[in-house]
Image (cartoon, helix red, strand yellow):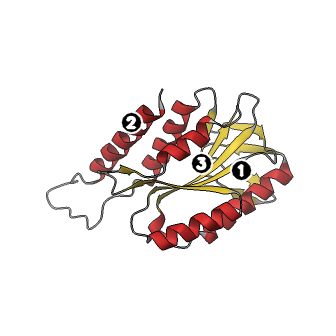
Amino acid sequence: MEIVDCIEKLKSEIKYAYNETKKTLGDNIYRGHSRAISSDIEDGIALFISRLQPSCKIFLDPSIHIDHKTHRPDLLVINNKNEVIAMVEIKANMGWCRNASGVIQKILSEDLIFKNTRTINCEFSNNRSYDTSYSNNVKLFLISLTKGNCSDKNHKSNKEYANANNVYQFNLFDGWYDSLINCEIEEFAKQIKNLAV
């Protein structure tokens, strides 16, 4: 599937999920804010990546237990040699954190733990688990669905901090969930297409 088609399909899926959150539950029920769509966005990004890299496996929100601590990366991309080639942290909206240094430090910390472990066991709620190898060559991503609610100055600072720490940071869209405008989605797609599988 072409990048442009994958992008349009992702935007359509996000818009649908967002519109579903606004449906009323009953005549006497009033919701002050939309239901969260974070899981729908994670699903959409996983589908987007799988369309760009159909030979890869996508591990979405696995539990990884190391030294009595559980790690739950948002998304891992696994190649056909059973190696992790990318770890992706997904934020529905970067505005919540304004300064992304804490998120980037969490990504770097997990990356180091996984590198030191070398073989990680990813567990899923259906009682299945998979061992996969994790090397020094894993690409790290921090992506925000939309750059809304955060100033350009803060986004520039976040991107500079990410780049200085070898984390690819992209603001995929501008605008809101039902009217997304392409921002850095093409650059993210190219990075995913160029992963060594």
Q: Nearer the viewer, residue 112 or 148?
A: 148
**Residue most toward the left?**
27
Which one is earlier in the sequence, the residue at label 1 or at label 2?
A: 2
Coordinates of residue 37 in the picture (x, y in percent): 40, 53
The amino acid type, in three-letter code, at marker 3 is Asp
Q: Please, is residue 40 above or below residue 67 in the view?
A: above
Q: Residue 179, image x and y in percent?
A: 29, 51
Q: Which residue is mark 2?
A: 9
Q: Is residue 39 visible?
A: yes
Left or right? Give the position of 48 relative to 128. left
Disc 3 is placed on an element classified as loop
The residue sitting at 79% across, 57% down in the picture is: 113
C-alpha distance separating marks 3 and 2: 22 Å
Residue 61 circle label: 3
* Residue 106 visible, this angle: no
- Find residue 194 and report its horizontal and vertical position in percent: 64, 36
Residue at the disc numbered 1: 64
Q: Are marks 3 and 2 in contact (CB under 8 Å)?
A: no
- In which quadrant is the C terminus drawn? top right
Front tag of 3 and 2: 2
Question: Which residue is more in the foreground, 69 or 151?
Answer: 151
Q: Which mark is residue 54?
A: none
> Considering the numbered disc 2 on the image, is that residue within a helix, a strand or a loop?
helix
Q: What residue lies at 49% left-to-right and 38% top-to-bottom?
A: 48
Callout 3 crowding tier (Cα within 10 Å): few <14, some 14–19, many ≥20 = many
| Separation of residues labelled 1 and 2 (CA atoms) | 31 Å
Residue type for callout 1: Ile
Q: Earlier in the sequence, mark 3 or mark 2?
A: 2
